[in-house]
Amino acid sequence: MPVQSATLDFVRRLLHREAIGSLKKVLAKLQPADVSDLITRCTPGERHLLITLLYVTRQAGPVLAELPDETMRQTLEGLSNDVLSRVLQEVGADDSALLLQRLPKERCAEILEKLPPAYADKIEEIFRYPPDSAGAYMNTLFLQFHYRMTAREAVDRMRAWFDTHQEPIYTLYVLEETQRLMGTVAVHKLVLAQPETMLSELIDPDPVCVNDYSSVRDAAETMVKYDYVSMPVVDDQFRLLGIITVDDMVDVMMESAAADAFQIHGVADEDRLETPVGTSLRLRLPWMLLNLMTAFIASSIVGLFEASIQQVVALATFMPIVAGLGGNTGTQSLAVIIRALALDDVDAAAARRGIVKQVLVSLMLGLAAGLITALIALLWRGNPMLGLVIFAAMVLNMLLAGFVGSAVPFLLKRLRQDPAVGGGVLVTACTDSLGFLGFLGISTIFLAYL
Amino acid sequence: MPVQSATLDFVRRLLHREAIGSLKKVLAKLQPADVSDLITRCTPGERHLLITLLYVTRQAGPVLAELPDETMRQTLEGLSNDVLSRVLQEVGADDSALLLQRLPKERCAEILEKLPPAYADKIEEIFRYPPDSAGAYMNTLFLQFHYRMTAREAVDRMRAWFDTHQEPIYTLYVLEETQRLMGTVAVHKLVLAQPETMLSELIDPDPVCVNDYSSVRDAAETMVKYDYVSMPVVDDQFRLLGIITVDDMVDVMMESAAADAFQIHGVADEDRLETPVGTSLRLRLPWMLLNLMTAFIASSIVGLFEASIQQVVALATFMPIVAGLGGNTGTQSLAVIIRALALDDVDAAAARRGIVKQVLVSLMLGLAAGLITALIALLWRGNPMLGLVIFAAMVLNMLLAGFVGSAVPFLLKRLRQDPAVGGGVLVTACTDSLGFLGFLGISTIFLAYL
């Protein structure tokens, strides 16, 4: 739901008239995500004015954190170190780390020096985590409660917190003296509790938590599985370090769901639109080489039958059809299975049924495609035997494609490999090579009649 | 994080000893998602015992709702209508609708008759929504508050609610007399408010809501964009009908992110592991025909050059390499762009940079692949001219593949088509046809030297 064009036009007109008062009112009513939308669609000049205004109204931080990568980088370049260091102090260490990572190393160091040392330390702590660990995603700006507090004291502490913070609180994290996480109290329990109740009486003990160095994908899966909106991040001594929230995890899960699908073609998770050419090249070169190897296998199978092709050159013409249809059928079966493995639980019985079904569907598609191709071959070349050979070759290859496409991911999984990575390359390698072998092999047997 | 095998073994031993008391204690400590894990890994006999036990301890409903599709269907078959109708009354109308949809039509009708009429109506209302509308996903079991209530009255109402319900409440939905949604109150505000404050004073007006018939994907995107954990569903008169929660939306977003990726190959969103063969066939047939058509175009291009192939049959042998590498390069570029379009905002400048980058990467991969292939051709066939021709053809085709693969999704988007659907078929059609045209065309020009 992007911001209405009407709003964009209105804000632009106000910007050009420099109607600061009206602008402030309009911006105050919009959510950070909406203002971020607006900024993305403004010219660089307009952007600068808007950001300056947001800085004055103390809205700049959350808006900056919502900007898409490239706009964020450009916008940050236009801000002075003084402005930026003040903005960062309003957004929390996790968002600050996110913004600072978009800057050149030296500028980042300059700004860290301008920040209060304790806060700069927190940000640098986040920098030290591997980018795909839970620690790199955690928010370190959170309220802590002690188990010997009463409900009333907890409410007072929350009241003080909301004087300077805006994010809602859904769960209280209750700690022992040693900073060890003792348990959680859902906010609604605080509503219902008598003021003198101790937090230790309201506590849900043994909360599901995640270690700071464990994979953020595992953390996201756990949150989604248990329908949590936030989850504590703890160190090895079970001390509370920060909180990860479901909105950040949604992005992680979406990227992870999409990643599986794209890895079918050997497209690495890190290969993005703005990845430098050198990095993309390094990521894709091994796949190109693998692809080249499998292409050479297919090619040498064709090479075995050069004598047949020389006699009946029409075979060369029909080769792309046999290979193309087989490749597509196999990749489709592969996609269905990979999706099932990524999104659901698949037990052995369901796997067997899945393979049988893909083979059946592919067989029927093969019968249809083979029939059509055979008819066209007959009409085009006037050779019924050529039609029959093509029919047999296509049915066989598409049957095989259905089996290979659906079996390969289960096989990779059993070998403890990621079933998604490069399955597509493997499947088309099979359908190409065995497709040519079948087609040219059958043709060679019946060569006298072609 | 599946349940530990130790827990599974322990539960099994207790089941076989029929140690009901100990079993109850173990199950009470586990989350519904964990118990669902356990059930998936049990034998049908063990399952039946477990479900009966969960029914007695009133845990069956939430556990059933968490089961994977096929296990859910099997487990429901083993329950009597009486048991099932009592379980359904514990889980809310949305989960009841989910469970009932797994049953045959007649059995579903029988069970609906056993439910209290008002509750059955609620479930049937959900059935009436299109499966991809927000209405089909909403929870109709929620607490309503009136704007003239005081904070104290709201707390009392919550207390009564929690006597019979367990799900946490994060947001209060405040209504006018006409059931129109007036606004929301975050629970933490209730904690901080004086008991006599009116809800109308605590309210956040103009909450972002979603219409019951609007697409659930749009609803999910809105929730993720604004970092909401729940969102009200309203009708055209802005009356509150239900709530959708972020945990349901995460599934929607994940499926949507994955769907884009799989549609590259023309794999429909509805084509799943357990889809009946007939449905899968119907969904895939049009793509097979499109694929056949593009394969015939490629084939007739090869047909144009049959004379050249007859003279230099090695050309047929190298055809699969030119086509295979081009197809893979194009599909990889396509995947990178589709992912960017699905997960981020891409403006015109970023699109241009993206295309240029993909062309550059593909050109360099093409130079590498062409060089290797030319060398092998030289060593295998001892023909330097053949190597040169293959080198030129591969560089050209992979350059083209990078351009087509990255430009096609932007083109489809500008034509207001889904950039993901079938892009793969289009890209390989181009790389196959133009690849053969380039390779065989250049070969024909230099035929005398081959």
Image: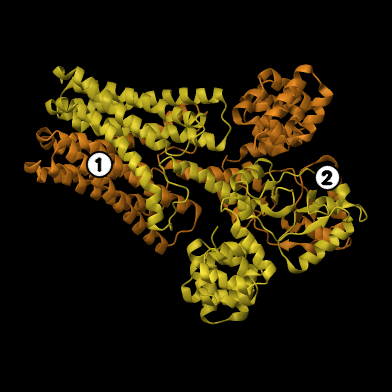
Chain colours: A yellow, B orange
Dot 2 falls on a residue whose secondary structure is: helix
Dot 1 falls on a residue whose secondary structure is: helix
- State left or right for residue B150 relative to residue A75: right
Tell which tag, 2 or 1, sits nearer the viewer.
Answer: 1
Q: Residue at x 22, y 28 (%)?
A: A376
Give the residue type at disc 1.
Answer: Val
Q: Relative to A405, is A20 above or below?
A: below
Read off the chain for label 1.
B
For label 1, the residue is: B322
Query: Quadrant of residue A307 in the image?
Result: top left
Mark 1 closeness class: few <14, some 14–19, many ≥20 residues within 10 Å: many
Q: Residue at x 47, y 48 (%)?
A: A269
**Percent x, y for residue B66?**
67, 34
Query: Quadrant of residue B306 in the image?
Result: top left
**Percent x, y for residue B312?**
12, 35
**Percent x, y for residue B228?**
66, 54
Give the mark nearer the N terminus: 2 vs 1: 2
Contact (Cβ within 8 Å) of mark 2 with mark 1: no
Comparing A248 with B415, the one in front is A248
For label 2, the residue is: B161
Give the residue type at disc 2.
Answer: Trp
Mark 2 closeness class: few <14, some 14–19, many ≥20 residues within 10 Å: some
Q: Is residue B285 visible?
A: no
Q: Relative to B367, is B193 above or below?
A: below
Q: Residue at x 77, y 68 (%)?
A: A163
Comparing A169 with B14, the one in front is B14
